[in-house]
């Protein structure tokens, strides 16, 4: 499903998901089960009557056993039903699984609904903190649908909770995406969902690691700004063996505004600098350094000025100037791209583009960074600051991202097109706060830059 190493770089542990993670889960690690082969024996083949005894069930009165099975399948299915008298009640069931390090797992089940209910699967870690590793939204369907997802927990061996809400989010006609706030998500109304045939098994998939150097570029670390709390540096990656002028890409790291460094963007710099694009990796003030949105975006804009002032020395081609960043770096870089007249391409990875309407995402409230009033949040949102013409944009996002809702990327792309810009998106099913498989992502990015900058890079 995705390149393990790449997805780890983008994953950001966040706070409890808005709906369904409010309950405490007392089971300790000693109660977790490690499965090495086909699992969920207690709930496979429709034997829910016995199987649910081993699951933690919330709002058990909303569930019953149904004979409504897919054609050609034996057994029974679990039936979930809501009525008008039960609005605000969200039933679910969960089980603890001890996932192995760096192993891939395949989860399968079948479900059928009324075409309105939108089942939601959460894969949680750190039970006491309620952190969520996956948030998978299933499409509403009035027919039996087969769900099949391959995923990995990376270097996160230990207990996880698979938590399933059969009707967590209603689909609303005319509304792009699922419910946009907790109240809407809780108000599910009438509806029925049946599902059966749960199976989880460890697969034999192994990712090929990204090769280490030697790299065909040279890195120079430069102090570009001194503040009261920290000296800020740029890591400038210059292609070797060619003379330039070089297209230049400014890279902004993520980390929730509280952690991270320019070193975190080496994987992206390597891809580009080896192919003739100069990269400038930016350090900016974090919250621990007294950073706020205004200060941090000011740091990045000062880095842009350094690029301008040193274009002759480093042979930067300011006619081919781009920004890129991921997560919190996607948030800051998307705004800097709109504020930089020379910028004509932007590549965002799981970024926050609208701090006012964050959808189901948990990241971006940021009272100590952005501020709490609407005007401050608009100033800290690229979607409200689109320049004319906008930079050509490509946005990568995981559809199952519980940290930053992918709907925001779709809305940002629509807003760019409304201003006459070119914008494309790559939303990867099953991926959380990450970008998905490395090869198709890299190929898509290289193709995008070749087209927009008239380059001939190969991948």
Image (cartoon, rainbow, N blue to C red):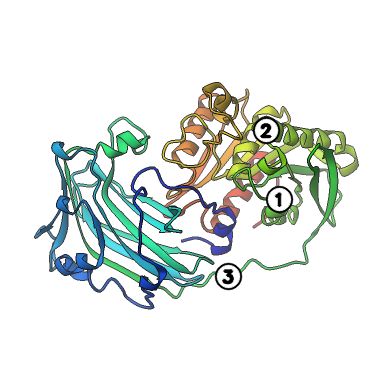
Quarter where residue 69 is shown: bottom left
> Residue 172, relative to residue 204: is it above or below?
above
In this orientation, does residue 70 appear? no
Quarter where residue 318 is shown: top right
Residue at image position (41%, 73%) is 203
Crowdedness near tag 1: few (<14), some (14–19) or many (≥20) residues, C-alpha within 10 Å:
some
Q: Position of residue 48 (x, y in %)?
A: 17, 65
Crowdedness near tag 2: few (<14), some (14–19) or many (≥20) residues, C-alpha within 10 Å:
many
> Residue 198, relative to residue 121: is it above or below?
below
- Marks 3/1: CA–CA distance: 26 Å
For mark 3, give the secondary structure: loop
Q: Which residue is mark 1?
A: 261
In the rendered structure, find residue 67 and report the number of the disc placed on it. Answer: none
For mark 1, give the secondary structure: loop
Q: Position of residue 434 (x, y in %)?
A: 53, 52
In this view, the residue in front, 346 or 284, is: 284
Residue at image position (26%, 65%) is 198
Q: Which residue is mark 2?
A: 336
């Amino acid at each position: 499903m995705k390149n393990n190493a790449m997805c780890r770089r983008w994953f950001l542990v966040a706070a409890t998901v808005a709906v369904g993670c409010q309950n405490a889960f007392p089971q300790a690690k000693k109660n977790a089960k490690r499965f090495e082969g086909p699992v969920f024996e207690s709930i496979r083949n429709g034997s829910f009557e016995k199987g649910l005894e081993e699951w933690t069930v919330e709002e058990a009165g909303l569930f019953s056993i149904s004979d409504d099975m897919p054609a050609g399948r034996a057994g029974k299915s679990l039936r979930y039903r809501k009525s008008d008298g039960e609005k605000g009640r969200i039933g679910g069931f969960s089980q603890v699984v001890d996932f192995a390090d760096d192993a891939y797992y395949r989860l399968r089940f079948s479900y059928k609904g009324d075409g309105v209910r939108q089942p939601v699967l959460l894969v949680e870690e750190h039970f006491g903190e309620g952190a969520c590793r996956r948030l998978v939204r299933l499409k509403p369907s009035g027919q039996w649908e087969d769900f099949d997802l391959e995923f990995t927990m990376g270097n996160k061996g230990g207990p996880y909770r698979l938590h399933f809400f059969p009707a967590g989010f209603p689909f609303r006609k005319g509304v792009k995406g699922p419910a946009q706030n907790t109240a809407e998500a809780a108000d599910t109304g009438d509806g029925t969902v049946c599902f059966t045939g749960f199976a989880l098994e460890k697969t034999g998939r192994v990712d090929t690691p990204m090769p280490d150097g030697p790299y065909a570029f040279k890195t120079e670390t430069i102090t570009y700004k001194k503040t009261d709390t920290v000296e800020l540096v740029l890591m400038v990656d210059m292609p070797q063996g060619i003379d330039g002028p070089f297209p230049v890409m400014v890279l902004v790291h993520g980390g929730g505004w509280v952690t991270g460094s320019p070193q975190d963007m080496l994987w992206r710099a390597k891809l580009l600098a080896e192919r003739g694009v100069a990269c400038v990796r930016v350090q900016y003030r974090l919250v621990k350094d007294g950073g706020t949105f205004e200060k941090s975006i000011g740091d990045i804009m000062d880095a842009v000025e350094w690029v301008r002032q040193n274009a002759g020395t480093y042979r930067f081609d300011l006619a081919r100037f781009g920004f890129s960043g991921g997560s919190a770096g996607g948030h800051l870089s998307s705004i800097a791209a709109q504020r930089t007249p020379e910028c004509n391409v932007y590549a965002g990875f799981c970024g926050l583009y609208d701090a006012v309407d964050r959808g189901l995402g948990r990241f971006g409230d940021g009272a100590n960074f952005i501020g709490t009033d609407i005007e401050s949040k608009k100033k800290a949102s690229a979607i409200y600051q689109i320049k004319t013409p906008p930079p050509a944009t490509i946005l990568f996002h995981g559809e199952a991202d519980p940290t930053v809702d992918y709907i925001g990327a779709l809305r940002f792309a629509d807003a760019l097109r409304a201003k006459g810009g070119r914008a494309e998106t790559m939303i990867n099913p099953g991926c959380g706060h990450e970008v998905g498989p490395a090869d198709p992502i890299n190929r898509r990015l290289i193709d995008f830059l070749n087209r927009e900058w008239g380059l001939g890079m190969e991948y």
